[in-house]
Amino acid sequence: MPQPVTHSLDADGVGWIVFDDPAGRANVFNPATLAALRAAVAALAGSAAKAVVIASAKEKIFIAGADLKWLGRLDSPAAALQAAQDGQAAFTAVADLPVPVVAAIHGACAGGGFELALACRARVASDARETVIGLPEVGLGLIPGWGGCARLPRLVGAPAATDHILKAQLVPAAAALQAGMVDEVVPAAELRPRAKALALALASGAVPPRPPAAAADAGYFAAQRPQVAARMRGQPAPLAALDAIEQGLAVALPEALAIEAAKFASVAAGGVARNLQHVHALKEAGRRATVDAWFAPAAAGTAAVEPPRFVGVVGAGVMGTGIAQWCAAHGVGVMLSDADADALRRGVQVIRGLFEDMVKRGQMTGAAAHKAMGSIGITTDLRDFADCDLVIEAVVEDVAAKRKLLGELAAVVPPDCLLASNTSALPIEELTAGVREPGRTLGLHFFNPVGRMPLVELVLAPQTTRATAERGLAFVRLLGKTAVVCRSAPGFYVTRGLFFYLNAACALWEQGVPTETLDGAMRDWGWPMGPMRLVDEVGVDVTDFIFREMAHYFPGRFAATGICRRLLEAGLKGRKNGASAGFYAYDGVREAPNPAVARFASAARRDLTARAIQDHLNGVLVAETRRVLGEGVLKSPDDADLALLLGAGFPAWRGGLLRGAAPA
């Protein structure tokens, strides 16, 4: 029977431990894999091996970490402790081999995969794009429990290790090299020969050149705790990781591993870990989503769907420039248009700034950014879209303006060119009335800022064909985004649910609940920002417009509050387009409740507990979400939860809006 881990000894005396799970596309750790690893290590320990190399036979995966389904079955701290001890024992056996061991890393090296690599004497990584390395456990409600908290600080120093573990991100091989997490980065074709050569060199007494690990300053961990507690509120894993790192550095490695295992057990079977692992599963399912639930089955033998490769974007405002830049950054040719030549010139400068920001963040090289910038054309003439295979309109939220534009586009683009609207609230069929071949129309609702928000609502009008939907979905994936498919309806899902929630918050404000009380309550519950601060971020004008749209489409159920209109009349627009005041006044990065808004507040202050505010506002969102599902705008509660997680910043550690809601 094929094993997930095999071993061999080559003619030069180098032992090879190779991971290749026959049951899946990825290598993951579970009891069977750990047992196979222990058997391979034991066999090589009794052989004539001079050195050992650990590698993977998978095309894009070294080891993807522990099997989350297995972790999800750890139903008690005792079971979690045993799992941590079992993994640590297997990796300690690797570290204790009498000959040097080198990890040859190609593809994703995550969690337990990197902890295995840390147990090796040295690490060589390929420079392939798919090679990413790190410890994402905190993002799953866990801590590294197989040596990551004990070994990484000893390798790179406590501050660097703490930062990496708390960020819970995988980094490219080059960044891992710079951080000292790996010793060498080589072309993929040279990985195994170089790892073998290094292993033999270590066997001959060579020592990898590494700077000494930086020690933490006195008071470092004490200073970290309140910052982490505030930034990652509600989550026990970050503080458990800090404890494991700090306490582990004060003792020898075996004792550090015991501390780490105990801290892992304290969080692994808890509700937050369950919730975060559920969210991970939602995201993975979202990446594999299809449109099958919305259409009749596709014909057998249907060819693979090709995404659009040359895209027109109409509107050089915030959304249009963001979409154009992100498309170009992902290898899509772009033609950006605006009727206002000055707006177009300003848009080009905005796009240039977005590319510069990506370079600063290490998301692309300067050369790649320059090439992508050169792939964007600009025009004031819609006839220049004649060769596009997708055009996205991102103009003002006005039915008449969008309908006129889409009609004009239909007359100049090819019959098979998709026509999409980026509207956040207007039903697609109202915008495409009169468009020739209406089956090619759909909504592609990106979120602001485009470069940082992973969600796109893929909106199906009654006329949208399966082929159009599939091409739209392929396009979203090409851009590295996750699509939630929904039926065209006022506000779709995220806008509708979120603005019912914001309107309810504004109603409490009008009744005398102060700005800081409302926002503090919702931040304490886990939202990244409170509702009044969110109104400022969205824009007071946009918020007021959507309130009125919701009142138009849902008469009798949505009574639009008036405070945003009053703020606009006073010239207070929030933070949109450089404005500096709304419910808050902004001074650079600082913000404080705006005293100029006090004159609009109720004379009678209403005192509500934080719990009462949280229950009311979240309850409004839950109720509207259930209505959306009842109307068939979304297909499942998981779709709703995923959309809020990716599109509205719902706190992932709570697992999802409906997952945590009381039964209807």
Image (cartoon, rainbow, N blue to C red):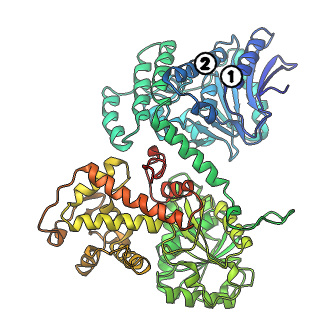
Horizontally, is 85 left or right of 650 in the view?
A: right
Residue 85 % position (x, y): 56, 18
Residue 269 % position (x, y): 50, 30
* Name of the residue lying farthest toward the left: 603
Label 2 Cα neighbours within 10 Å, binned few <14 / some 14-19 / many ≥20: some
Q: Do the residues labelled 1 and 2 touch (CB within 8 Å)?
A: yes
Residue 646 % position (x, y): 51, 56
Task: Give the camera-side residue of 201 and 149.
Answer: 149
Look at label 2 and name its amino acid.
Answer: Asp
Q: In this view, does 306 lie above or below 287?
A: below
Task: Give the camera-side residue of 568 and 508.
Answer: 508
Task: Give the camera-side residue of 276 and 26.
Answer: 276
Quarter of the N terminus within the rendering: top right
Would you name the residue on which mark 2 appears? Answer: 86
Q: Which of marks 1 and 2 is nearer the N terminus?
A: 1
Residue 168 visible within the image: no
Residue 71 % position (x, y): 58, 31
- Point 55% across, 43% down: residue: 278
Secondary structure under the numbered disc 1 in the rendered image: helix
Look at label 1 and name its amino acid.
Answer: Leu
Secondary structure under the numbered disc 2 in the rendered image: helix
- Point 41% across, 60% down: residue: 621
Horizontally, is 212 left or right of 65 in the view?
A: left
* Distance from the alpha carbon under mark 1 to that under mark 2: 8 Å
Would you name the residue on which mark 1 appears? Answer: 34
Quarter of the C terminus within the rendering: bottom left
Q: In this view, does 14 lie above or below 436?
A: above
